[in-house]
Image (cartoon, rainbow, N blue to C red):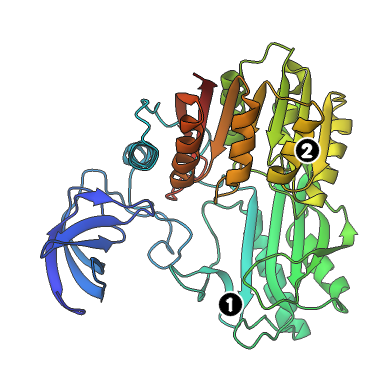
Amino acid sequence: MQKNEIYETVITGMTDEGDGVGRVEKMAVFVPYTLVGERVRILIVKVLKHYAYGKLLEVLSPSVHRVKAECPYFYQCGGCQLWHMDLEAELEYKKHKVEDCLNRIGGICVPVQPVVMAGDQKRYRNKAQFPVTPEGIGFYRRNSHTVIPIEDCLIQGEWNQNIVSAVKVWMQEENISPYDEKMQKGFLRHIYTRAGNNGILVTLVTNGEDFLQFQSLKEKILQAEPRVIGITQNINTKATNVVLGQKNKTLWGKDHVTDAVGKTAFSISPMSFYQVNTTCMQSLYEGAAAFAQLTGREIVWDLYCGIGTIGQFMAERAAKIIGIEIVPEAIKNARENAKRNRIENTEYYCGKAEILAPKLAAQGMWPDVVILDPPRKGCDERLLKTVAELAPKRVVYISCKPSTLARDLKYLTAAGFQAEQIRPYNMFPRSAHIETAVLMSRT
C-alpha cells in the first residue's frame, strides 16, 4: 500500500474518535465520515508501520444509518464527527465505545446501560470558543490549527452568530488585528461566550491589556444581542494554544452568568468548569445522586468539584459535602453558590486533590461517599491511592473519556472496589464524545 493509491474496502468498526475502520492488504485504514457496513472507495493519504489513513472518495454501499449532514461545515470543521449518522446508531456507537474501553483496558465486564439521551441534538451548548485568526473567525479544521470561518454552528446557541458578526464589523471599522499564532502578533485571540438562564456573558481574549476601542464594541454587541449582561476581558500574552490566560477584567456589566440545575442555582465565571449541556447535566446529576444512595448521614467528598455543582445538587441528601478544586476562581464561585442556595453543610478547599485529600483524611474527615469528576486525563494515581486507602462505601466516578475511566477503574478494582452500574449520557450529541457515570462499591 502506498500513499495516493485508491482502494475499495468495507468498514468493519469505528475508532474512539468516530472514524470508520477498514482493511487494505491486511492493514487497518482509518477513514473519517464512514459507517460500519459501508463499502467505500478511499484515497490513501498517509501510511505508517501498522496502519494507514484514508480519505473518503465515494460511498458505494451506504449504511441504513447514514443521513445527510445538516451542518454545511461538517466535512471541513473538526468540531463534530457524527452528523452523517442517525441518532439510533450514534447512541449504539457510544455505548459500544464505553463497553470496549472498560473491557479491553479495565478488564471490567459489567453490562453497560443504554445511553441516556436528554435534550436536543442541536443548540444544546451553553459555551462557545471562537478563535480569531487572519483566516477568519470560526472553528479549527479537523486535525489542524487552520480556522474555518463559520457563520452559524448548529450545536451552539443562535446568539453566537449575532455576537460574532458584531465583533467582525467592529474589527473592520476600528482596524483591530486578529491574533496570528505563528507570528505571535495581533490583538484579539478568541471570542468566548457563556449562557445562563439570566443572559449571556461575552469574554474577549486579548494579546495585551489596552482596550481603547471598547466603547464602540460594547455598543455593537448590545445592539446585536440584547441578552448580553456582561463583557469581560481575559489577557493571554503567552505563546500557547491554551485559550484563557490567568487575568480577567470586567469591562461592562456582570462578570458571571447564573444557571440552575434543578432547584440549585450557580454563578459561572469565564474560568469555571460547567457542563456545556445543561439539560443532560441535570439527568447526569440525578443519576449520580441515585448511585450515591445518600440517606442524610453521609460525608461526601466532591473531588475536582469545579464551582460546586454536583455536590450542592446532592447537599440536602448528605450530612456534609467537602469539595476540592485546583482553580481558585471556581472555589470562589462554589462558596458563593453555597451561600446563594443557602446550603450550610459544604466546605471547599483550593488545591490539587491528590495533595489535599490525604491531608483532610489525616484530620479525620473520612468520606462515606467519594464523587470523582476529573478532566479528560483522568485521576492522578496518588489520588486513587488515597481513595483506596480511605475505603469509602461508594465511589461515583463521572468521566468524559472512556479510556482514562477504564484505566482508573482498573486501579480501583485492584484496590478492592467493584463496578456495579455503568450508565453513559449523550452530553455531546453529533460529536464522538460521551459522558459516563459509574457506581463502585467496596467488595
Could you tell whether 45 is left or right of 199 in the image? left
- Depth-wise, is mark 1 or mark 2 nearer the camera? 2
Asked if residue 279 is positioned above or below residue 252 in the image, the reply reads above
Numbered circles on residues, count: 2
Task: Name the residue located 61 percent from the left edge and 24 percent from the top edge.
Answer: 391
Specify the quadrant of the image occupied by residue 297: top right
Q: Is the C-beta separation of discs 1 and 2 under 8 Å?
A: no
From mark 1 to mark 2, how far is it between C-alphas? 49 Å
Give the residue displayed 49% in from the left and 37% down from the top. Answer: 411
Mark earlier in primary sequence (1, 2)? 1
Horizontal and vertical percent for residue 187? 74, 80
Disc 2 residue crowd, few under 14, some 14–19, many 20+, Cα 10 Å: few
Query: In screen coordinates, is 412 left or right of 292?
Result: left
Query: Does 411 sit above or below residue 286?
Result: below
> Residue visible at 56% across and 24% down?
287
Q: Is residue 234 toward the left or the right of residue 411 in the image?
A: right
Q: Is mark 1 on a helix, strand or loop?
A: strand
Q: Can residue 265 be seen at all in this image of the molecule?
A: no
Report the residue marked by disc 2: 359
Label 1 amino acid?
Answer: Gly
Label 2: state its secondary structure.
helix
Q: Residue at horizontal 56%, vertical 21%?
A: 291
* Vertical placement of residue 40 versus 138, above or below: above
- Along the viewing direction, whichever of 376 and 76 lies nearer the viewer: 376
| Closer-to-camera residue (71/409) | 409
Q: Mark 1 points at which residue?
A: 136
**Which residue occupies the extreme bottom position in the image?**
183
Q: Which amino acid does label 2 sit on?
A: Lys
Categorize mark 1 by other alpha carbons within 10 Å: few (<14), some (14-19), many (20+). some
Compared across the picture, whether 343 is left or right of 353 comes to right
